[in-house]
Amino acid sequence: MAYNLSVSQSIKNLEISAIPKVFRRVFEILPGFLSWSLLSVFILVSFYQPLLAAYLLIAFDLYWLAKSAAIASRLVQGYVHLHQMDGIDWSKRLNSLGDINNAIRGAYEERIATNGYKNLSLRHENSRYITYLKNLQKSKTDILDPNSIYNAIIIAAYNESEDILEPTLKSLTDANYNPDNLIVILAYEERGGSEIKDTVSKLERKYKNSFHHMMSVCHPSGITGEVKGKGPNITYAGNVLHRYIKENNISTENVLVTTLDADNRPSSQYFNYLTFIYCTSSNRLKQSYQPVAMFYNNIWDAPAAMRVVAAGNSFWNISLSMRPHLIRNFSAHAQSLSSLIKTNFWSKETIVEDGHQFWRSYFTFGDDYEVVPLYTPIYQDAVLAGTYWRTILVQFKQIRRWAWGASDVAYVAYYGIKDKSLKTGDKLSKFFRLLESHVTWAAAPLILAFMAWAPLFLNPNANQDIVVHQLPIVISRIQTVTMIGLFITIIISLISLPPRPKHYRKSKTFLMVFQWVLFPITTLAFGAIAALNAQTRLMFARYLDEFEVTEKAVKHVK
């Protein structure tokens, strides 16, 4: 069934456009200014004070050595935790919520059954689960009835083919979750043309009886005040979903909304896991839920450089999941419909609606708002376009779009100053972490890659100083130690790969190891340069006001 919605129902709440232009421009310039300044400072100090530059560079590399070790450690912890959660029967846990005492007894029985060294990890998780249940019982948390919860899935589409969209729908039908509690919305763009409309209609006819309800929603083009992006599309679909929920007398607190891109495929455990966490949370209406985005759908098909980028981004998400206080909404995420209504859904004024949703929610719900990590994957595509060079360009644009999150600096500064109810320390901490993350994203890889030679090249007399003369060697040895983190990454990349497709020879597995020689290049080209490009455009008000959809291609085996 296709729905339409009147545009007049849109309202403004905590919007970017409400920020005074002068204020906004100052803070839009800030990230790029700091990134370029940091690079310039190292160059200037190398020219005028090469010895000082040498000590600064050694200190900087030692800092990144410590940071790399911490990231590698969290990656291992996150990977282990991801597999711990994957071994849990979340359906059984969900169904046991009706009686906490029975749930605790069942958990004790499970712990006894998992006795032994091989089950040590699962046994440890089961002990934590028992503690979790006892805390629920003690706190008298209002546990929701899982059968009353509906999971709504908004799948955003622009002009993707049936080959891309259907596997996403298939992953929903294959999920280990009651399909009668799933509501699926295919949200597509009018500007995507007639082909996407035909594709969506065909898929809706095919899958309409597979869920509690399924509908397609066409987002009209040319609405004033909207960027051409995912945010306006899923917000429009969210409003249609809200109307459907009201018409069917379903409580908005009983509806969880997950947003997916066209190529996203939730794990079979995702909906049971998400519903369990939601039903047992005492702060559920001030939370959003973040699964681990893993770019593994077509990892065997993508070019080597894109495989490195995809694996690196996947592992960063795993590592970040171990630091919940730093997690921000990214790509696929979930929030209750009740919460989304209070934030007026997602922003229609930015192309980074996912990360921006964290700040909308933070300034709506206050200090109590949090992002809860879900240790289960949402599988996504690595970048693969029609040709190799096209793939490189599309990959660069995708990372640049992610780096456009630097535009949130002005938003956080303005509403942070305006909202007096939030804790000052918390606001400042979040602001400076946001700013620091974008500056180091753009500048740090360039400093690590090139600045060790700057004192020698820029100052003719620097060669006479033994510290400056030995600087490239010292830096090289520090970075060699840092490579231990890369070695751990390579091991996890191999053991986490999906099965090799039959049409690829075994020799392709060896390429999955050798591809990591491209890591320094991909870090610079698809990391630092893309981020610096985004920040420089922001400095000069050359806005990315259109969501450049990541082109998706599928390799067909003959």
Image (cartoon, rainbow, N blue to C red):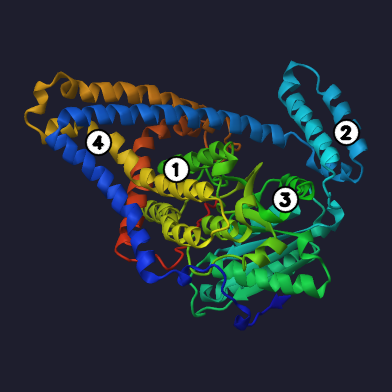
Q: Nearer the viewer, mark 2 or mark 3?
A: 3
Of labels 2 and 3, earlier in sequence is 2
Of labels 3 and 4, earlier in sequence is 3
Query: In the image, what residue occupies the spot 37% across and 51% down?
Result: 531
Please tell me whether residue 318 is drawn above or below residue 482 in the rendered image. Answer: below
Query: In the image, what residue occupies the spot 76% across and 65% down?
Result: 252
Query: In the image, what residue occupies the spot 83% across and 59% down?
Result: 180
Local SS, label 4 = helix
Image side of residue 424 versus residue 523, left or right: right
Please give the residue where the numbered disc 2 appears in the rendered image. Answer: 104
Please give the residue where the numbered disc 4 appears in the rendered image. Answer: 450
Please give the residue where the numbered disc 1 appears in the rendered image. Answer: 309
User: Mark 4 belongs to which amino acid?
Assistant: Phe
Mark number, residue 283? 3
Of labels 4 and 2, earlier in sequence is 2
Of labels 4 and 1, earlier in sequence is 1
User: Mark 1 belongs to which amino acid?
Assistant: Val
CA gap, disc 1 and disc 3: 36 Å
Of labels 1 and 3, earlier in sequence is 3
Query: In the image, what residue occupies the spot 39% across and 26% down?
Result: 482
Comparing 153 with 335, the one in front is 335
Local SS, label 3 = loop
Residue 364 image offset from top left, x and y in percent: 61, 61
